[in-house]
Amino acid sequence: MRTPMIAGNWKMNHNLETGRAVATAVAQGAAELTAAKKVEVIIAPSFVSLSSLSSALKSSPDTVQLAAQNMHWAEKGAYTGDISPSMLLDVGCSYVILGHSERRHVFLESDELINRKVRSAIAHGLKPIVCIGETLDERESNWTEAKNIFQLRAALVGVSAQEMSQVVIAYEPVWAIGTGKTATPEQAQEVHALIRAELKALYNEQVAHATRILYGGSVKPDNIGELLAKNDIDGALVGGASLTADSFLALVAEAAK
């Protein structure tokens, strides 16, 4: 049985004060649900807030886990403005989001670069949340299947079946991120089932069954219930709805049902 996961990607939002307030409220509100192992809760603040939030959450380390929004693949070096996996571990991160569509399309990160980061994260003991997804043009051109399979395969080059126990996949249709548009539950399930079938082909049935696949695309409290009712949707990678404790906790509560 796959434990549902709700991961909040704060992107470039919240300062130290507001971030601590939201994280503390989420930890308090989710404590009972996470103690019962009904749902795994993750928040991914900006780099500058990771240390502060790690300190704020020390009293409840099993309630809310920290993720970084990105990382460099190298342990250290002359990479101005970047951050290494060991630095993320130092501030208490358990997860790291890699291959988010904004990193791919705004910052032009390649599939090869994302794969290097995925393998580095695993090697350092960080769990990667690997994002894949098609643009609107690609969906309208009937390339949804080809694009998601290509990105999945490229991201997992050199990742073993055993290492897949550390990996989470997030399907995020680019056309539904921050646009107010959401894939229908049926559209989302179709791609999630495709991803799971491809994991079986790449590895085996056990890996395919055990790997959590999140949906990320304008997830809100009023649509998450229908999404999570689908067999292959194991949670959500959430943007705007994760910025306030009330809306984020509503998502967590739905996932715990």
Image (cartoon, rainbow, N blue to C red):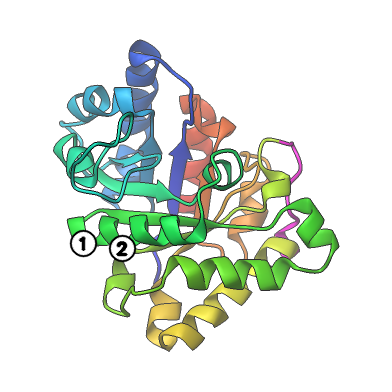
What x and y, as percent, mark residue 245? 46, 26
Residue 148 as seen in the image, left or right of residue 206: right
Residue at x-position 30% and y-position 30% = 80
Contact between marks 2 and 1 (CB within 8 A): the answer is yes
Dot 2: within a 10 Å radius of its alpha carbon, few (fewer than 14), some, or many (20 or more) residues? many
Looking at the rendered structure, the kind of residue marked 1 is Ala
Q: Tell me if residue 218 comes above or below residue 216 in the rendering.
A: above
Q: In the rendered structure, which segment of residues is drawn in magenta?
A: 179-186
> Residue 178's quadrant in the figure?
top right
| Front-most of residues 216 and 248 | 216
Q: Main secondary structure of the magenta part?
A: loop
Residue at x-position 68% and y-position 73% = 146
Image quarter where the N terminus lies is: bottom left
Q: Which mark is residue 119?
A: 2
Provide the residue designation for mark 1: 123
As helix, strand or loop, the secondary structure at mark 1 comes to: helix
